Amino acid sequence: METYIEASVILLLLTDIALFGTSRLYTCITIAAVQGVLLGLIALFANAETFIPRIIVIASIGIVIKAFVFPYLLKRTIRQAGVQREIQPFIGYLSSLVVSLVLFGVSIWFSAKLPLALGAGRSMIIPAAIMTMFTGLFLIVARRKALTQCIGYIVCENGMYLFGMVAVGEIPALVELGILLDAVAAVTVMGVAMYHINREFDHIDTDRLSSLKG
Amino acid sequence: MNLILASIAVLFLSSLVSLAVQGKPRIAGILGACGSVLALGLGIVPAVQALMGSQFAPLAFASSMPWLSFSMGLDPISAIFLVPIYILSGLVAVYGTGYMKPYAEQKNTAFYWFFYNILVASMVLVCVARNGLFFLLCWEVMALSSFFLVAFENDKVEVRKASWIYLIASQLGTVFLIPMFILFGNQSGSFEFSSFYNCLTPAAATGCFILGCIGFGTKAGIIPFHVWLPEAHPAAPSPVSALMSGVMIKTGIYGLVRMITFLGMPPLWWGMVLIAIGALSGILGVLFALAQHDIKRLLAYHSVENIGIIVLGIGVGLIGISTGHQTIAVLGFAGGLLHVINHALFKGLLFLGAGSVIHQTHTREIDHMGGLIKKMPITALTFLIGAVAISGLPPLNGFVSEFLVYMGSFSGITSLEAETAMPLAGVIASLALIGGLATACFTKVFGIVFLGEARTIQLDHVQESPASMTVPMIILAFSCVVIGLSGPLVVRLLIPEVLAIVPISGPFVFDPSEWLVNISIVASGLVVLIILGAGFRKFLLSRRTVGQTVTWDCGYAAPFSRMQYTASSFAQPLTDLFSAFLKTKKHIKVPADYFPAQASIETHTADPSNERVYRPVFAQAVGLLSRMRALQQGRIQIYVLYIVVTLIALLLWKLR
Amino acid sequence: METEIIAMYAFSIIHMFVGFALAPLMIGIVNRTKAVFAGRTGQPFLQPYYDMVKLLRKGAVYSRTTSWIFRAAPVVGLACAVAALAIVPFGNAPGLLSFEGDLVFFAYVLGLWRFFLVIAALDTGSAFEGMGASREVQFSAMAEPVLFVGLATVATLTGSLSLSDMIAGLSLPLAEIVLVAAALFVVFLCENARIPFDDPNTHLELTMIHEVMVLDYSGPDLGFVLYSAALKFWVLGALIIGITVPLDEGLPVWASCGYAFLGMVMLALLTGIVESVMARVRLLRVPQLLAAAGALAICALIFSMR
């Protein structure tokens, strides 16, 4: 099982780095969906020995929502808004890749400082979780489109989920479902909001919302 | 030791003599050059002996000044810096006799020889001084004499400006060294180096380390204290640039290394700081070099890069010491210090080659040159050897020293904990990047200056430089090849010097020269292969027709020289990629209409640390200090009043 | 035991000759793969050999602009390629001249070759060749750190500093190896001037990199250039195969060499497939691709260090 967990964690990290270097919104959504699947798999692998139905259920719900519901909602928004890719981000893609490596180093350093006891094959989970959160925050900060920021939010949530999984051990099902519900609500609201921003302004660039200040 | 003293005496004497015969510039030149060559003959003997492991008794002459004593010593650390100083200054002096000849009509070249020999003597003294105040005294003589050499062509405005920048930068550097020595003196109770060892508390040692890094780093030219290098080198006559870039900036490294031996066990972060500084200087140095099209400015930035490599080596060595890994420490220091010698050889060679080119073409602009290899074959060949060496490529000497630093880092990442191994992995990545970019830069310089067709200069009256200029270049190129092929022997000489820095616990077991034997074998094999291949090619072509034609320009039958790629266009993809650091300014006049008559592009890469850090700071300082101008009334009475007031204040303070 | 060591070195020598003999075949396989993908019959596998033999038997034409640099570069390139071939291991057989730190020499000897190729291109004075040279140095300056970080990862995993020991000491499956192999494959495509970095079959000088740099070569010189390019393909390929193909140490040397050769053929096929299904990326995007490869390599290095 350790090998599978490790492989999933490494794949998760690679998806993070891919998010730093991708400009196409469709690809970003797909990557975020893949992350959702990977998280569900990690949760399943981590509890493979002790067969707890509750965990399987939550993981499955997570996979369904993150891999199918969110992408569906977001892709629909893209179609409505008619945007394909992030043009002129605040931080260029080459520099973003460099930033991603720096953040990766930082998250490894952070995790080394955190006093957490982890089993074999799980030493990379904490850095991966922190890195995923960083990725989400970076997307929110460094990109222009509301949609990318929404993806950033989802990714950030992914990181927290992973962190919670190892740091707290068993999250009460209610809390976990609550977070998921939160994310669903957020994505829906943002979808609606973006639809309206787009209808009013013919674009979804959030930085130009400052013109509303009057 | 007496021979060193004798060489210093000869240098001072010849500088005075050349000043005495200033009416006859030719004789002054010959006498001045003789001084340096004689000093080379005298001084190299004890220096090499010290490298071989001979012990020399220190000398001391008391002085009437408190704290100051003229104590001198010669140990392997000094010797490793003395050897390039003697060799390069001797060769550059010979070169100078040829180079300065055209100046003799317009300028007093006797001054050149006067300051030249003083500079050499002061560099030697810096390396043998064993008293803090004496060291600072020689340090200042060195700064001043080199200032006068930079300002040699002081009838030009830009030369005057550059030399002022140099003077101010070196004085600011000294400002940091004085408190450092005071700290040492305060804690040890004396200014003798022998009392400095391990005299500091950890906090004071950290302070000294930082002060020393800034103070010595300014002289060595690490980023961000490098601003004087790209200004001073183009302004100075080429032999002076060769001497300053080849050996004078290394006195900064000498100071750094000497200081490290005083400080005792280094904490881990010192090594990391040096690695960060070294990587920054190395990468940014070579990037700025890429963006230049003034050949001497470009070479000046390469000095920044190579100082970066040396500092990387020292940083690796320090990490080795603080983690207790002998192998890493020895490899790091050996690599860094071998690079000191190597850089002196190939950078000296490159500046002399550049001087030879400038001498003939009367321009420093790379984009104007081209095709010089046909007119100046010896300069071209020696410059090529220097270019390959500075790019760190086998089978030349630059590779050997970079190899040692690489191996230090590689053995570090295989044997250390992740936290200490990460910076060493950074060393590997930055060395690789520096190597690639240096190759880009020197293919550019060599390719544009010597190959292709002449762009705007006239080749008709260009000819090979006189023997007095080519022979020193040939000797330097030859020594680059020799060190490249005989790495193990050279490194074996370096070991005692490295051991003087590395506090070894237990017996010394590791000998990097064993690895280098293989490098020498493979490098020699490479040379043999090249010769074999050349023979095979000759055989193949011997019975065939060999034709001549114009260059294939995709069917265009009348290519002319202005259509060639220029240095700026060659470097453009890389400078655009790193434009975030370089901030290259472009002035473009795009072609207009169907038959464009005029179009032009001009690029200029200013130094951002100069533009964005020093200029604003100095502008502020000027604003602040101009208020003090009220004190300067220009009337003698007021100045006397100041003196009286000061004296009374002092008296009151003492009698209080 | 001693006989085994002798056998191993015998295989190292044999590898030299196998490399000499079969390197152009790999280029033939790549070309054939591309032809099959395009629905053509394609040239014979041995076409690169025919080309080279023909070139070696021809005379040469030189531009009047060129100097001895232009004539020396192919020879230096060939010598460098041979030196690299002597270092790289193949299967269980160590490189003929394997020593501690040969990985640095390996990378830098390829650098020496590049240096001469580039100045030879500038020697012709052609704007097109200057353009190719300029791109070559840009991309290789970025590929070099990727190669070194990748090799550093393998060094950390195995604790050894010579290519032969490193490759012998690897055991699969490791996530790091997959990442390193991916990064090195990108470097391999870049260094060998393959799609997506450079299109070896393009017909427009403006878009070429490697091919445009050697435009002015003819006769034996061109033969040398083509042959050393084939050797470079073999050498870098052998490195990647060594890292990715798991070999049991108990395997007889000849069998391991056989596996390695199969790996080389697969790599050539893969290269051909990549060339068939991908387009050359825009030149401005190339640094991004190399940076991504660098990110993979750095990730691998960080994993290997924990």
Image (cartoon, rainbow, N blue to C red):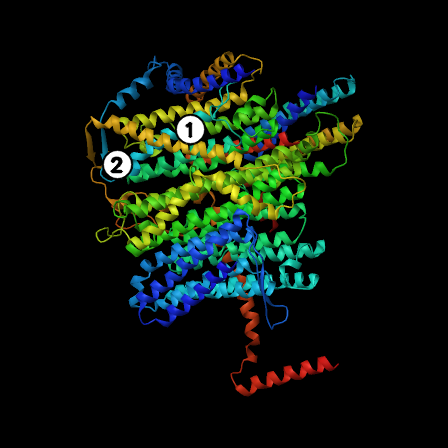
Q: Is residue B396 above or below residue C18?
A: below
Report how far apart the C-alphas of labels 1 and 2 lie in the structure: 33 Å
Q: Report the side of B233 relative to C291 (left or right).
A: left
Amino acid type at mark 2: Asp
The answer to whether mark 1 and mark 2 are in CB contact below 8 A is no
Asked whether B410 or B472 is in front, the reply is B472
Residue C83: assigned label: 1
- Residue C18 in percent (x, y) is at 41, 17
Subunit that carries the residue with mark 1: C
Q: Residues within 10 Å of mark 2 (few under 14, many from 20)?
A: some
Dividing the image into 4 quarters, which one contains the C terminus of chain C? top right
Q: Is residue A35 above or below residue B18?
A: above
- Residue C91 in percent (x, y) is at 51, 18
Residue pictured at 41% horizontal, 44% vertical: B480
Please say whether residue B280 is visible from this viewpoint: yes
Quarter of the image for residue A201 reads: top right
Residue B58: assigned label: none
- Residue B179 in percent (x, y) is at 63, 63
Q: Report the side of B16 relative to B195 (left or right).
A: left
Q: Which residue is mark 2?
A: B553
